[in-house]
Each structure stands twice: as C-alpha cells, then as structure tokens.
Image (cartoon, grey):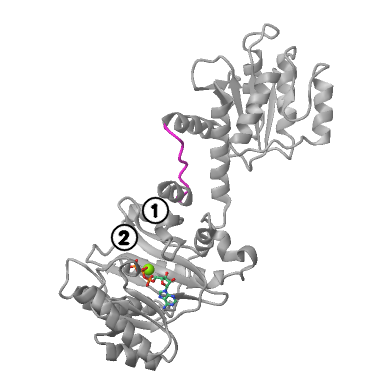
Amino acid sequence: MRVSALFRQAGIIAGDGLGELFDVVTLLAHQRLPAGRRLAIVGNAGGPLILAADAAAAAGLELPELAEPTRRALTGLLPPGAAVANPVDTIASVSGDAFEQALRTVSADGGIDAVLAVIAPTPLTGRDDLTVAAAAVTAVSTTPLAAVVLGQAPRVRTLTAPAQPGEPAPGAVPAFAVPEDAGRALSLAAEHAQWLRRPRGSVPAFDDVTPAGARDIIEAALADRSEGCWLRPTVAADLLAAGGIPVARPEHAVSAQMAADIAGRIGGPVALKAANPDLVHKSDRGGVRLDLATPADAAQAYRSMWAALGEAMGGATVQPMIAPGVETLVGIVQDPAFGPLIGFGLGGVLTDLLADRSYRLLPLTDRDAAELIRSLRGSALLFGYRGSPPADVAALEDVLLRVAQLADDLPEITEMDVNPLIVHEHGAVAVDVKIRVARVPRTPDPILRRLR
Ligand SMILES: Nc1ncnc2c1ncn2[C@@H]1O[C@H](COP(=O)(O)OP(=O)(O)OP(=O)(O)O)[C@@H](O)[C@H]1O
Ligand SMILES: [Mg+2]
C-alpha cells in the first residue's frame, strides 16, 4: 500500500507481476502515450467485443460515443449489419481493407485517446488479413493502437507491417492474447501520461523556519546520547515550534505544586500528562488527564497519576486544553528504500484501529501536500462532513510542508509522530509530539532524490 502510493508519486509504472510489466513495456515501446482514458474498440466478432468492453471498463478506461461524422463514415465503410457505436462491430464478413479503413476512421476521431482492435480469426477472412490491417494503420496514425488477437499463443507480441523500400520502418502494434491484459496495459499507460502532464507544484521555502534553532536543540539532545533518543515532550514541542508549527506548549512539572503553578500561569483549563518519553500510549496507562479547570484540579491530577504510575510517570507536562477539531496524525518515518517519508493520517487514540494513513516522498511540493490531505479514506472528515464545519485545510497543508522542510533540513530527525494535530475551522495545533533523533549521514541519497 505504502510502496504503491510512493511509486505513483514518483511516476513509476508498477505492473501487477512480470506479465503485466512485459505488457506495458511492449505497448510503450511501440505506441505513443494515450492523451487520456477514452478508448474506442473495433472488432469483427460481437462476443469478444463485449468481453473487451467489460475488461476496458474494469481497467478504468472509458468507451465514449463516437462522433457523428465518425459513425457516418463507418456506416459507409462497413458491411450491412455492422454496429457503429462504441464498440464498433464490423461483423465477421468485413474485408481486410474495410477493417483498416474503420480503424483509421476511429483513430482520427478527436474524442478518442486510444484504439483497441479485437480480432477473432474466422473462415470469412484470410488468416492474417485483419492483423495486417491493424499494422498498416499504425504506420500512418498517431493515435495509440493495440490489438487483441484471440487464439494467439504468446501473451503479447507485436504486429508489424512490412517496410516499404526507402521508407522508415513502420510502427508495430502490440497484440495481446486476452482483452484484460490489453485493458490494463492501456490503463497504466494512460495513468503515466496523466502523471507526466500533472503540474509539479513547488516546494515552498519558509523563512520563519529556523533550522539553526532546531539544530541546536538536536545537538544538545545528542551531546551525550549519540546512539539516539526520544526527545523529552517539552523539547520535542520546542523543535516543532522552531519549525513554525503551532504547538500546545507543554511545561514540565516535577511536583503537584509545580503543576498547579503552571496551570495558574496558563490560566484556563489544562491537560496534564506523564512526561516519560518511553511511556507509549499514555492515555491507556492513566497518563493523560484532560480538562483540569483549576490549579487545584491540576495538583490533584498530578498526585493521583503519581499514585498510579510512580517513577514511570517521569514527572508531568502541563499544557493548555485545545478546542476539539479533527484529530490528525503527521509524522516522519524512515523507509529503507525511499529514505524519509512524510506520513499523514487520521489521528487521535483510534489511529491504529483506523490505520487510515498515506505517505509521500521528500521534497514535498504544495501539490503533494494537497493530494496527501485528500488521499485518506476518511479525508471527507476535513471538508465538513455531515454538518461539521470544514477544517482549515490550508493550515494543515502548511504544517505538512513545514514538517517536510524540517525532515529535509534535519536528517537527524529519524522519527516524528505528531498525534494528534488538532485541525480547527481556523488553524491547526500540535498537541502530542514525539520525536526521535540520532546521528545519521548528512547528505540524502542522490539516487532517491532522482525519483522526484
Ligand atoms: N491539550 C489537549 N487539548 C485537548 N485534547 C487533548 C489534549 N491533550 C490530549 N488530548 C486528547 O487526548 C488524546 C490523547 O492524548 P495524547 O495524544 O497526548 O496521549 P496518547 O496518544 O494517549 O499517548 P501516546 O501518544 O503515548 O499513545 C488526544 O488524542 C486528544 O483527544
Ligand atoms: Mg498521542
């Protein structure tokens, strides 16, 4: 799942197995990329045409109506009884010449991006009349053309017209044994063409991100922990803030009195959490207390957490309560093949249950960020789902781009997990921040970078 999303982002055509790889390579070696997904199918037998139409639709291709002049021309060309809708049924008595003319006519239809010839050998035409016709068309047409030749032994081969003396070699038509393979190959080619056409977007440079400040924080943490460590919650929040990301800043308390003092200073309802960075899923262990209205409540929460967790509590952090919104997860993970990735998902305490996450390569462009936000099954939650106000997607995008810049500037950040980042109608705030740092080679792998 993650790998296929990254392949798609990097423009890698990923076939499902070696057979599909050869299919798409054979197509791309001989035909141009289709400009879109609109396919016309022309064949000499009704049953295989229906199967081909189904296979094309299953592969995500469209079979639009042919233009009126195209249909009129086909009616003039083809034997009586032919169907000139899409798919075009030339019927079995079609001559090689008429089949060739029909393919040419359909290829010239401006509403079509690719043509598939479906050829069933019948006693009514010469053995190779129709395959020769298809090969002749590709020599003169720029519309991508593929064929399905029922009964052929190889999964895919090429149909070529003999070269004329003194002329350049004509193109070749990839011919598949079954329509499913043809449909998938055409669909992968169309997807790739779409990727090539897409606007790339740009990687914004934030002038208020202070890598120097962030670097000092990391150096201080690594000074005596060169093997790497999880940053303390207050330090992790400082690092995020140095990246210009809004954080509900936690302050560290080592006694109930201190917790009360901090709560008093914050002046509104606070959250008090166990500060030990090695304690995962704090809330499961009674390490998160929310909505503490007064300093006395904060002190009481500290005492009861200490009674439950003891030394494992590691003191507490006290931070302001943040208004409810859409809880998301933003993170950095290291992939052994791709290097640092930006992760985004639905967050909060149900994040592992929902497992609705998506990843992108660095550097992250504004388009990547916008797509990432829309790539979740649950993305609709951010856009005003069932009467809730739409969340501030621009603020979320800003956070993703800033996290990406931190990951890019500071390869020592080996892991980051902001969960939740609460996204409101206006703004987004990081509430729980975990960051792991370690010494790593400074320069990003140039081969990985070339993927972008
Ligand atoms: N300051 C806050 N304001 C509002 N809600 C909060 C705040 N802190 C925590 N919460 C709520 O409590 C939930 C759990 O808090 P938090 O993410 O800090 O701990 P955790 O996720 O249980 O711990 P871990 O990340 O170790 O698994 C959050 O998803 C959020 O709903
Ligand atoms: Mg959390």
Residue 333 location, x and y as percent? 34, 59
**For this rendering, which residue is in front, 258 or 207?**
258
Kindly state the secondary structure of the residue where label 2 is placed.
Answer: loop
- Location of residue 355 by image quarter: bottom left
**Magenta-colored span:** 10-17
Residue 200 location, x and y as percent? 53, 58
Any part of residue 166 in sight? no
Tell me if residue 408 comes above or below residue 241 in the rendering: above
Which quadrant of the picture is home to ligand 1?
bottom left
* Res. 450 mark: 1
**For this rendering, which residue is in front, 174 or 315?**
315
* Res. 71 mark: none
**N-terminal of the two: label 2 or label 1?**
2
- Identity of the amino acid at label 1? Arg
Residue marked by disc 2: 444
Kindly state the secondary structure of the residue where label 1 is placed.
Answer: helix
Q: Is mark 2 within 8 Å of ligand 1?
A: no
Could you tell me which residue is drawn at 35 percent across and 69 percent down?
283
